[in-house]
Amino acid sequence: MIHSLLRTYAIASLAIVHGLGVLGAPFAAMIHFGQPDASAHQNFHVVWEAFKYFAASSVCLVIALIPLRRGEKWAWWTMLLGCLALFGGMFIAHALSLGGPAIDHWSYGSFLIISIVALTILAKIPAKPEQQH
């Protein structure tokens, strides 16, 4: 029973993190689009990056709720790579540009930690055989 509950919490944590990504992408674009010093090219990238982040978060959300919940091995690895790219990538971007705001460090750092903990739980507690396909 406790294992099933831990798996449920781990999946829910990943779903919440990526659901926030889906919601946050357009919000971040609204904040940055049309800033006074921004060029048309920079505005283009703001919108394009928002679409990419929205798409990546949406895919991760679907993976968390369906194949990862069922215990499909490929979904675990895909989610790990997705979380490392989406959340860990912010730290690489900051290291290269020194332009990452503190709120991004806190939010994406938290999302990365939550994701790693959730994925560790899912690796240690496999899905029940009837859940696997």
Image (tube, rainbow, N blue to C red):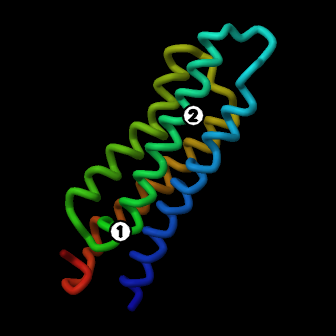
Within-10-Å neighbours for mark 1: few <14, some 14–19, many 20+: few
> Quick check: 71 left or right of 120?
left
Foreground residue, 12 or 117? 12
> Quick check: 44 left or right of 133?
right
- Which residue: 41% across, 67% down? 65
Element assignment for label 1: helix
- Which residue: 45% across, 31% down? 89
Foreground residue, 30 or 86? 30
- Number of numbered discs visible in the structure rendering: 2
- Which residue: 61% across, 24% down? 46
Within-10-Å neighbours for mark 2: few <14, some 14–19, many 20+: many
Instruction: Reply above or below: 105 against 128.
Output: above
Quadrant where the C terminus is found in the figure: bottom left
Element assignment for label 2: helix
State the residue position of label 1: 66
State the residue position of label 2: 50
Instruction: Reply above or below: 20 against 9.
Output: above
> Quick check: 72 left or right of 117?
left
Instruction: Reply above or below: 127 against 83.
Output: below
Residue located farthest toward the bottom when viewing the structure as drawn: 1
Q: Which mark is residue 20?
A: none
Foreground residue, 16 or 38? 38
Residue located farthest toward the right when viewing the structure as drawn: 36
Quadrant where the N terminus is found in the figure: bottom left
**Amino acid identity at mark 2:** Ala
The percent coordinates of residue 123 (x first, y second) are: 28, 65
